[in-house]
Every structure is written in structure tokens, then in C-alpha cells.
Image (spheres, rainbow, N blue to C red):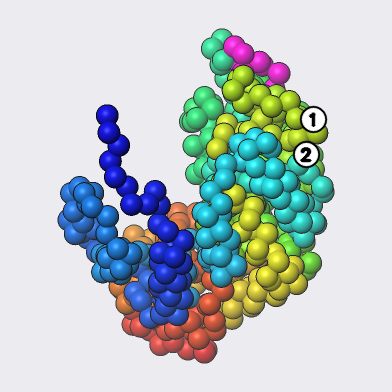
Amino acid sequence: MESESIDSPDMSNAEFAKALERVSDWIVSYRTRVGGLPVLSRIQPGDIEKALPSSAPLEGEPVEAWLKDLEDIILPGVTHWNHPGFMAYFGITGSAPGILAELIGGAINTNGMLWKTCPALAELERVVLRWYATALGLPDWFGMITDTASTSTLVALAAAREATGLDVRQEGLSGKPPLALYCSEEAHSSVDKAGLVLGVGMQGIRRIPSSEAFRMHVDQLEAAIEKDRQDGKHPFAVVATVGTTSATAVDPVREIAAVCRRHGLWLHVDAAYAGSAAVAPEFRWTLDGCDQADSLVVNPHKWLFTPIDCSALFTSRPDIFRNAFSLVPEYLRTDVRGAVDLMDYSFQLGRRFRALKLWFVFRHFGTRGIAARIREHVRLAQELTSWIDAHPQLERLAPAPFSVVCFRVHPAGMEEEPDLERLNASVLQKVNATGEVFLSHTKLKGRYCLRVAIGNLQTNLERVRRAYRLVCEAAGIPATGI
């Protein structure tokens, strides 16, 4: 069979240089104008699919055509997480050094499944995570990078299951006593999903009540463990949260660690959001007791200005992870002495060069620069908190120790929860429809509230002030105190 004539197997370097210049110009333009775009996408389901051809082109098209469709079709369907008015969920910034690293990572296009397949990836990951641990005041633990905290928590709890000694790896769960997993009622849903994947089942997941400050009740945790033991269950792990998803509360980790030691349970700490605050020394209290944990996750792609995805998983017990996951077929055997093959510590084989962007972020900002930006976000949140607390028709529903503020509109005389929920849901919809800011919501102790999360590098006091004004305008109340 004759081969087809191909002008070039890839873009020529000259073509690539021109294309890179055009893409670079587009990225700079986007970063310059993103603050003027609607934060929340306004398209309807199916709009993007309808606007795109049903099949790929037969002949190649120039980069100008790609960028035109990017601008005309794709961009209107983007919710702009890099917008200074993005204050939903958790703050996330694709910072300039992180973007540069992503470009380089794509160009290198390596796979760090083994040390041998990319020594630089394996060793830089270990080094940059040591930097991170030191910056947080954590011990010099074994670390590895995954995509998100959901994966990190799943991997950590799989190691916790291995540590039970039930030999689930070899024999499975059949015939074993039912496993029991514990977390706060305020813990992230990824804990439940990990339990589902690991065979714990929803019936084996214990959500422990929290205090009025949304912190896990340690006495109720211990009582639940003791009851499960009496009922023939096998308690195996506790997940404590540093910065709960809704209220950013910090569980009493040191006390929880003591319970885990008494009962021989694995302690995993989910510090995905708030953990990075500890880069600023005055927030080291955030991780108090975390040195007693068996594993801990913190996400640089939340509050450390690293483009998604980048989740750091630390453990004091890497041997357990290796026992749980190491599986080396002949085609992956290298026997390189002194090498650490990261595939042995997770179910993940292929590994992107994520450490590169975290390295660039540290190199550009430095730990002092990171701490200063975290302090500024907390300061902005405190400004917002002061306006809310002083307003007679606004009610804060949770402490605001970091950069997230939970509150609601609460007019005098309106006390029924359904009425308050309808009002605040309407306010949220009106605010987000402006396109100037994007807020999210949650429920705390059954009460619907608005949630402002500050964490973007471009968010400033004027943008926070504008969000406050929009809430007041949508509620039909004066924007006082600013």
C-alpha cells in the first residue's frame, strides 16, 4: 500500500512560531479584557454543539480559523473563573507563571509514570512538594501530586483501608465486617464518593454533627466509633476538614487525632482550600494538629494561584500507600536503584508534569509574596464582613476566618425559612444575571445563604464593594456602610 504524500508531519518550526505568537497575543488579550466579560456564561444547553460542525474537517485549517471559532463560539460558553468578579465556590487563579508552565508542559509532553520515563518530573515533584510542606509548617512527609482533592482523598482512604489488615487487596471485601468511615456533616461530598468507590457504601459513612461554628463534635465522633464496634462494624478512617466547603470551618484536628490514636483509625485531613493560608505564619493555627495525621490534601489550584488541576497529597505512611497500590507488570519493570516510581503510590499510571506550574508559581511569587496575597484576600473578606454585620437587613450565618463570607438578606419581620430562601435565591439570580460578579449559595444548618469566596489575584476592594452593592440593589435595600 502506497503511503500518502504528507507535506510535513507537524507544523514547521516557522509556522509554529507564528501560531504561538498569535495564541500568545490572544491569551494576553483575554487576560486584559476578562474583567469586562460576563462572569457566568449566558448560553443555553446545546448552543455550542449546534454552532460546531458535526464532523471534523477533511483538510487542515489555519490557526486564524481556530482562534476565530474560539472567540465566536467557545468564549461565550465559558464561565470565567479567572474573572475578578468570580466569587463562587472557591477562589481560583490561573496566574501568569502557571500559564507559562502549562505551555511548557504541553511542549515537553512527558509522562512521569516511572522515574525512568521522566526523572525530572519525578524529582521536581518531590522537591517542590517539600517546599510546599515547609511553607505550610508541615513535617517533611512523602508527597505526590494528583489532579484534584477528590482523587487525593480516594487514594488516601484506599491506603487507610489497606492499613486495617483485612487484606482487602488480595481477598476483596466479601465476608469482611462492614467498614465504617467518619467525617463531619460539613465535609465535602468527595468523602462520600470515595466511600462509594471503596465499597464502604452510604450505610457505612457516618456524618458526625457539627457545632454552631460548624466544627465536628469530637465526643459524638468517639461515641459513633464505639457504637459501630459494638454493632460488629469495622471503623477504619476519619476525615477531618480544614476549611469546610460551605462555611470554611476548621475541625478540631488535634482532638480528632487523639481519638484516632485511641481507636487505631487512620486520620485523613482535607485542607484543600484553607491549608494554603498557612503559608502566612499568622495562619499556621489552621493546621494545628495536622502533624498527627496519616495523610493530608491541600490544593494549590485553589488558593495558591496555580492553574487547575493540581492537588498535593502528603502522607506520613508512604509504605502503606505502596502496599495498597504497587503492581509492576514486566513491561513497567525498570529496577533502577534509588528511584521512586510514583505509580507505586496510587492507582494512577500516567502523570502530567503538574509540578512544573507549582514550581513556577513559587519561583515567581516567593513564599512572602504568596503570603501577602493571601493576607489581602482575607482583608477584603473582613471588609465585606464588617459591612454585612453593620447592616440591619443582612445576617452573617458563619464565622469568616479566611476569605469566604456566608450571609443572607433578612428583612425585619420575615422569619419563615421558605420565605427567606425564596428571597435570597431571587437575589442570587439577579446578581449573577448582571454578569459583573458570580456568587454561589449553600445551606448552613438548613438555612439558605449567599456565599462570597474571594481568591482571585485580580479581585480588589472595588470589585468586592460592587458585589455588596449588587446584593443590596437586588434585595431592594440600601447599601450602607461602604
| 474 relative to 150, above or below | below
User: Image quadrant of residue 155?
Assistant: top right
**Amino acid type, callout 2:** Ser
**Amino acid type, callout 1:** Arg
- Residue 337 is marked as 1
Image point (54%, 43%), residue name: 150
Q: Residues within 10 Å of mark 2 (few under 14, many from 20)?
A: some
Q: Is mark 1 on a helix, strand or loop?
A: loop
- 310 or 378, which is in the foreground? 310
Q: Can residue 164 be found in the magenta stretch? A: yes
Visible residue check, residue 429: no
Image point (56%, 10%), residue name: 175
Q: Is residue 464 left or right of residue 132?
A: left
- 5 or 197, which is in the foreground? 5
Visible residue check, residue 453: yes
Q: Is residue 259 left or right of residue 443?
A: right
Q: Can residue 204 be found in the magenta stretch? A: no
Q: Which of marks 2 and 1 is in front?
A: 1
Name the residue carrying label 2.
316
Q: Is mark 2 on a helix, strand or loop?
A: loop
Q: Are marks 2 and 1 in contact (CB under 8 Å)?
A: no
Image point (73%, 35%), residue name: 340
Q: Is residue 479 left or right of residue 346?
A: left
Picture coordinates of residue 103 (x, y %)? 52, 60
Q: What's the distance in space between the residues labelled 2 and 1, CA to CA?
A: 23 Å
Residues in magenta? 160-171
Picture coordinates of residue 193 (x, y %)? 49, 37
Q: How crowded is mark 1: few (under 14 residues within 10 Å), some or many (20 or more)?
A: few
Looking at the rendered image, the quarter that the N terminus falls into is top left
